[in-house]
Image: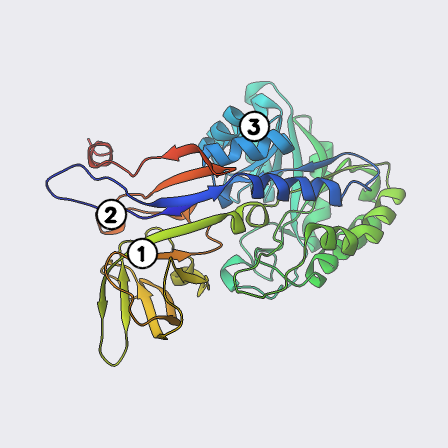
Amino acid sequence: MVESSTTSWRRPVRGHRCTSTTRMLPVKAAREYQEAFSWFPDRVYVCYAMKANFNPYLVEHIVDETRAADVVSLWEMKVAVNAGAETVVVNGNAKSSDEIRAAVERSWVINVDSFEEFQRIEKIARHEGERALVALRVNPKVSPDTHSHIATAVEGSKFGVELEIAERVCRRMIESEWVEFLGLHYHIGSQITDLRPFSEALRSVRTFLEDTGLIEEISYLNIGGGLGIRYRRGEEVPSPHDLAEELQEDLKELHSESSGFDLYLEPGRSIVGEAGILVTSVRQVKRGRRRWVFVDTGMNALIRPALYDAYHEVVVHGGDYSATEKASVAGPLCESGDVLAEDRELPIDISEGDLVVFLSAGAYCESMASNYNCYPIPGSVVVRNGEITGVRRVQDYEAFSKTWW
């Protein structure tokens, strides 16, 4: 994808650049997950995690391959259904009553995040006269090497139920007249490039199932997502096949000890991340003790550097890299944290109008864009085989202003 925008006081907001995503890479990545886990004895569901990028054109292409999605809100549900998702799992630590009701009505699996949420689901299911399909999200307490904001299974996390009390919650679900207990769910975090935490989490959950005897009760095991992608040139990252190989022995043994269960995965970033780019335009270059390149969009379109100290490769399109000097790239927002890249070797002659491209911007960029400083949400373009297959227009001021009434 590509993102950026140009504004004029005297004419409607319009976009000359946007976020661009090639359709083929996400489909290929989704297919790789399916192939990587094809050895699993029962069914495997690759549920695309829509929070990574909910662009409906992208979701349609991905879901056409996987037929499954992982959603967190009513609007994600709508996009998933419109894209043709047949299998939907519902996540989130504080689901609304409307979200729970929608899942119950459609017989979607709800990954229950707490005992209190189970009680709410049970009440809604009773009112609707329909049994809810549920799995319990547990916290295996592993600490992957990733940013603390995206580590979701550490001690004290807001997500999931600690294994020490999880058996009681599972037994209560099994006894309930209004929910059907399917199994367990866990998700340890995001942008994880070391496979060991994935193994640690699975073994922790396996031990829990064996020790409690719940291994005979499950027909569903959801191991979440979290596999990292390449953000730095030359960086080595594991593939879905590497992840499958790492988990194969434990999953096969666990399956043989059980009465059989389906395997669910929730990849997001590793499907769309490397497929997207953010294209910006230089507004001006500021020289002093430090050289600054100011571009026409900032953390309103690419919040990851400010939020996670994240790194994205930066390329000046058509730039002369035979003569470079260090510069930092920043957006136009009234915020000191609006810095997209620091101390990068960029062409000395970079100037107004040059295109600055941020790589690996397909995940958690468009989906986290904002109207900070009343900048419009950038447009996006989905490209397939060199042809544009979907366009999101730059947000129009009239549409923006009508959200207030």
Which residue is denoted by mark 1 in the rendering?
298
Q: Is residue 362 visible?
A: no
Q: Residues within 10 Å of mark 2 (few under 14, many from 20)?
A: many
Q: Secondary structure at mark 3?
A: helix
Image x and y of residue 284, in percent: 22, 63
Mark 1 Cα shell of 10 Å, populated few (<14), some (14-19), many (≥20): many
Say the numbered circle drawn on residue 79.
Answer: none
The residue beneath circle 3 is 103
Image quarter hosting the C terminus = top left
Q: Is residue 298 above or below residue 89?
A: below
Residue at the image position 33 percent from the left and 72 percent from the top: 327
Report whether residue 305 is seen.
Answer: yes
Give the residue pinned by disc 2: 375
Dot 2: element: loop
Identify the amino acid type marked 2.
Tyr
Q: Are marks 1 and 2 in contact (CB under 8 Å)?
A: yes
